[in-house]
Image: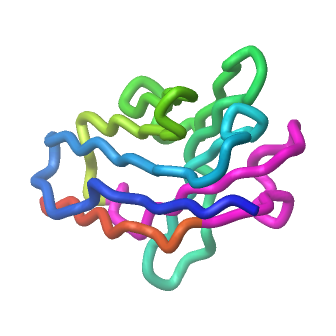
Amino acid sequence: QVQLVESGGGLVQAGGSLRLSCAASGRTFSSYTMGWFRQAPGKEREFVAAISRSDGSIRYVDSVKGRFTISRDNAKNTVYLQMNSLKPEDTGVYYCAARLGAGKVVVTTLWDYWGQGTQVTVSS
């Protein structure tokens, strides 16, 4: 069982930056692929970024490439999402997720554990 707690959301102007953190419970954090998803009002939850448990391979949705960076610190059981050059369309609730499997990271239903979410609002 893994519990995930996100933090770092808030209100920021377009062009600004935020850093989200996700603290995970348990002693097997390094065994999990970690990811970030987001959900805008009236829309489905969508994949944002993922980082593998093994070789640290990373994947991003096209809309955030070059602006967002996912990283993990296994010693601190924490995964981060650095968000730069934020746009109003980045607004939504951001969720941290964990899974033991690998592959098909964009498929929401394949993830095993979810945090409660943190709100990110980007004003124009």
In this view, 94 is above or below 56: below
Total marks in image: 0
In the image, taking residue 48 as reference, residue 69 lies left or right, namely: left
Does the magenta portion include 59?
no
The residue at the point 36 percent across, 55 percent down is 90
In the image, taking residue 110 as reference, residue 90 lies left or right, namely: left
Considering depth in this image, is 38 or 97 the residue closer to the camera?
97
The residue at the point 39 percent across, 47 percent down is 21
Considering depth in this image, is 95 or 64 the residue closer to the camera?
95
On-image quarter of the C terminus: bottom left
- Give the farthest residue toward the top: 55
To which quarter of the image does residue 50 belong?
top right
Expressed as whole percent of the image width and height from the top left, the position of residue 78 reads 49, 40
Q: Which residues are magenta?
A: 89-114
Does the magenta portion include 103?
yes
In the image, taking residue 15 as reference, residue 72 lies left or right, namely: right
To which quarter of the image does residue 113 belong?
bottom right
- Give the farthest residue toward the bottom: 42
In this view, 34 is above or below 92: above
Expressed as whole percent of the image width and height from the top left, the position of residue 100 reads 84, 45
The residue at the point 59 percent across, 34 percent down is 60
In this view, 45 is above or below 71: below
Expressed as whole percent of the image width and height from the top left, the position of residue 7 reads 33, 58
The residue at the point 15 percent across, 49 percent down is 14
